[in-house]
Image: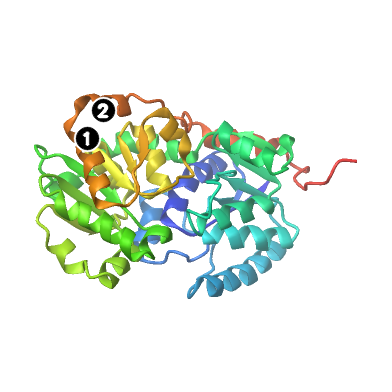
Amino acid sequence: MKILYAFGTRAGAIKMAPLIREGVKRGQKNLIVWSGQHYAHNLYEEVFDDLEMPRPNYDLEARGSTCEMGSTIMKRMEKICYDEKPDIVLTHGDTITALFISLASSMSLTPVGHIEAGLRTGSWEPFPEQICTRSADACSALFFAPTEKNKKNLLSEGYPEDRIFVVGNTVVDGALQHADMAKKKSGILKQLKIDPEKPLVFWSCNKKENVLHKERMAGIFDAIMEMKDYTIFCSVMPSTQQAAAKYGYSRPLAGAKHIIWSPCLPKYTDAIRILLESDVCLTDSGNMQEESACLKIPCLTLRHVTDRPESVEAGGNKCVGTEKENIIKETRAVIEDKGVAKRMRESKNPYGDGKTAQRIMDIIEKFEGKLERWEKS
């Protein structure tokens, strides 16, 4: 089969890597399309090299506003579908890339498989992720749902049960594969001079629902500025840096002695190594909510709603909003109350066992020649 993997963010690369490796292992004809949504070296080429993935066959080089990126992705992806005639296009998650890749592919009469289908909040937020994931599902022929809850969401919206498969999340495959490697090979803790005797917080915040909202980011920034008795490692995406500059926090954050303000690390093994040593993860990232659950790191989600409610229900994650006082209170509770931390670390991981890529590829192979979705009479 000719399988086309289309994605365009660092998180997408991390989550698609196990699937690409599985396709290579099985001798499929694999094509990789990179949208260009992320294009900085530390979010693109260096990530591919660290994950030991082949470089993309196509880079769509989408740039500009969301709609400008979308028009570029759709125009160029349509041509690729017509020229390459893949059996299936696999896209991932709730990104702008997933929205426009799935739309272009389905309109070109190419079957789409949506990895991480069915994630819902039941609200406008997170924005624009809910728009993207719902649109990708609407375009899909196969639905790879991480959890039973995601499957129920899809069924409630009328998607065909015989096309929905609960497979887990590929991020678990990637995190487990890289955790041991990170312990053996990564020297990032010494490089950053992280004090092993001081509590460590891993912080990552870049969702539009937060970075476009001054009061929310003020609460989040003020909270980490005030927790001076902890080391806070900040994994900074471009949108995070822009928000810090826009709201007047660039200098205070960069100058705070207890904060390591670092551009997002290109090596996944380095990021995992820091997370493994962390007492708690503060994030609005869906990826990091899942990774924390997998690696048994207590997670506090800087959102008012989450599309990863399974880890909240399991007890390893908690939505704490964006107000300074609550973020500080909940963070201190995890770090200073060993009972709270123990309960969160011992919670069940609801996102899979590390064999998601195998399951997805098995399903795709069973649908060879039957990927088009027709209504039953």
Q: Can residue 284 be seen in this view?
A: yes
Residue 333 badge:
1
Q: Earlier in the sequence, mark 2 or mark 1?
A: 1
Give amino acid for label 2: Val
Badge 1 density bin: few <14, some 14–19, many ≥20, Cα 10 Å: some
Quick check: 345 above or below 262?
Answer: above
Residue 1 badge:
none
Percent from the top left, x then y, of residue 114? 61, 47
Percent from the top left, x then y, of residue 76? 62, 70
Residue at image location 10% in from the left, 45% down from the top? 229
Left or right? Give the position of 9 relative to 357. left
Left or right? Give the position of 307 relative to 186. right
Query: Mark 2 and 1 residues: CB-CB less than 8 Å, in contact?
Result: yes
Percent from the top left, x then y, of residue 136? 62, 54
The local secondary structure at tag 2 comes to helix
Residue at image location 64% in from the left, 42% down from the top? 143
Nearest the camera: 31 or 237?
A: 237
Left or right? Give the position of 269 relative to 6. left
The CA span between labels 2 and 1 is 7 Å
Nearest the camera: 99 or 179?
A: 99
Which quadrant of the rendered structure holds the C terminus?
top right
Nearest the camera: 162 or 21?
A: 162
Which residue is denoted by mark 2 in the rendering?
340
Give amino acid for label 1: Ala
The local secondary structure at tag 1 comes to helix
Quick check: 337 above or below 308?
Answer: above
